[in-house]
Image (cartoon, grey):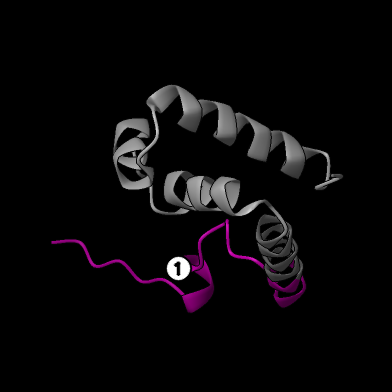
Amino acid sequence: NESISADSEDLTPDTAQSPLEQLSADEQRAQIMAMIDQLPPKQRAIIQLREMDGKSYKEIAEIMQLSEEQIKVNLFRARQCLKHKCKF
């Protein structure tokens, strides 16, 4: 049995964020959520179900009582809107 000694610094993953980086990531998340909140209700619900809840197109279609094609179209439109900073 080999014993391994490590300083606490060695146990910190390379992907650890500094407080400034974490603040920036938190601000980005808040901006994205604010943009999602500006989407039309149907698009907002669909993007939340897909991106945040991880639902399939079929599951979303059942929940929203729409066809899978309508889900895909609305999701595309929502993503385009977010990509273009919700310029209506």
Coordinates of residue 71 in the picture (x, y in percent): 47, 32
Q: Residues within 10 Å of mark 1 (few under 14, many from 20)?
A: few
Coordinates of residue 13 in the picture (x, y in percent): 51, 61
Q: Residue furthest top?
A: 69
Q: Which residue lies furthest to the left in this view?
A: 1
Please give the name of the residue rendered at 61% of the width and 30% of the height, measured from the top-left corner.
76
Residue 66: quadrant of the picture = top left
* Residue range (magenta): 1-23
Q: Which of 1 and 46 is in front in this view?
A: 46
Coordinates of residue 68 in the picture (x, y in percent): 39, 26
In the figure, 58 relative to 69: above or below?
Answer: below
In the figure, 86 relative to 75: above or below?
Answer: below
| Lateral position of residue 40 relative to residue 59, left or right | right
Please give the name of the residue rendered at 51% of the width and 67% of the height, measured from the top-left corner.
12
Please give the name of the residue rendered at 83% of the width and 39% of the height, measured from the top-left corner.
84
User: What amino acid type is highlighted by mark number 1?
Assistant: Leu
| Quadrant including the N terminus | bottom left
Q: Which residue lies furthest to the front in this view?
A: 65
| Lateral position of residue 28 relative to residue 88, left or right | left
Residue 3 forms part of the magenta stretch: yes
**Residue where numbered disc 1 is placed:** 11
Please give the name of the residue rendered at 41% of the width and 71% of the height, measured from the top-left corner.
6
Coordinates of residue 62 in the picture (x, y in percent): 29, 40
Determine the secondary structure under disc 1.
helix
Residue 8 forms part of the magenta stretch: yes
| Quadrant including the C terminus | top right
Residue 77: quadrant of the picture = top right
